[in-house]
Amino acid sequence: MSSVDETESHLPPRHAPLPDLDGGGRRDDHRTPSPDEFVRVQDSEEFGDLRSTFRRFAFPMTAAFLAWYLLYVLLSTYATDLMSTPVLGSVNLGLLLGLGQFASTFLITYLYVRHANRRLDPSAERLRHELEGDL
């Protein structure tokens, strides 16, 4: 028995560690769309609306977060007196703003998930059902 066989001896006989690349793992009630169908959906008004809805959220949020991060870095570098201002005991403004970076990351993640669930996912699901023919 080779070393590969020994390491996989505990697995079921028909174990396949990688998915089938021929699409054999797809459910029978879905079909594989043709390239022309993908182009048709990409050119559709609903897909354009979906893309612009995503961009209207993602681009401003990304720009705002990058500006906030850059402000923090610049303040840390050039406004050390401001950043070392005591707020509560040995906690200073720089530490609070640094922790604010983490808080803003979680907030942005929450806002995106909420936005996607409400605005993006329903349209994307309709387009997927249309392409796969299960509507």
Image: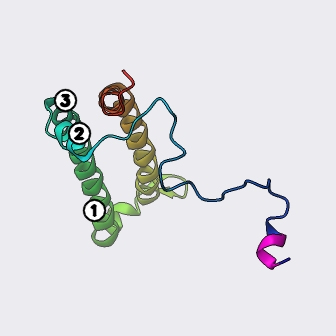
Query: What's the amino acid at mark 3?
Result: Glu
Q: Residue at x 43, y 33 (%)?
A: 30
Residue in the foreground of this view, choosing between 99 and 46: 46
Of residues 134 and 71, the one drawn nearer to the viewer in this rendering? 134
Q: Earlier in the sequence, mark 2 or mark 1?
A: 2
Tag 2 residue: 37
Binning the other alpha carbons within 10 Å of mark 2 as few (below 14), some (14 to 19) or many (20 upward) gives some
Look at label 1 and name its amino acid: Leu
Q: In the image, 30: left or right of 57?
A: right
Give residue 28's position: percent from left, percent from top.
Answer: 50, 33
Q: Depth check: 109 or 90 in front?
A: 109
Q: Which residues are magenta?
A: 2-6
Secondary structure type for disc 2: helix
- The tag on residue 46 is 3
- Residue farthest toward the bottom in the current orientation of the protein: 2
Could you say whether the residue bearing mark 1 is in a helix, strand or loop?
helix
Q: CA distance from mark 1 to mark 3?
A: 36 Å
Q: Do labels 2 and 1 touch, CB within 8 Å?
A: no
How packed mark 3 is, by other alpha carbons closer than 10 Å (few <14, some 14-19, many 20 or more), is some
Give how far across and how far down residue 39 sits, in percent.
18, 43
Q: Is residue 24 magenta?
A: no
Q: Is residue 86 above or below residue 118?
A: below
To which quarter of the image does residue 43 belong?
top left
In the drawing, does residue 2 fall left or right of residue 28? right
Q: Nearer the viewer, mark 1 or mark 3?
A: 3
Mark seen at residue 27:
none
Q: Confirm or deny contact between disc 3 and disc 2 (CB under 8 A).
A: no
C-alpha span from label 3 to label 2: 14 Å
Whole-Å distance between the Cαs marked 2 and 1? 43 Å
Q: Position of residue 133 (x, y in %)?
A: 35, 28
Q: Residue under label 1, please give it.
A: 70
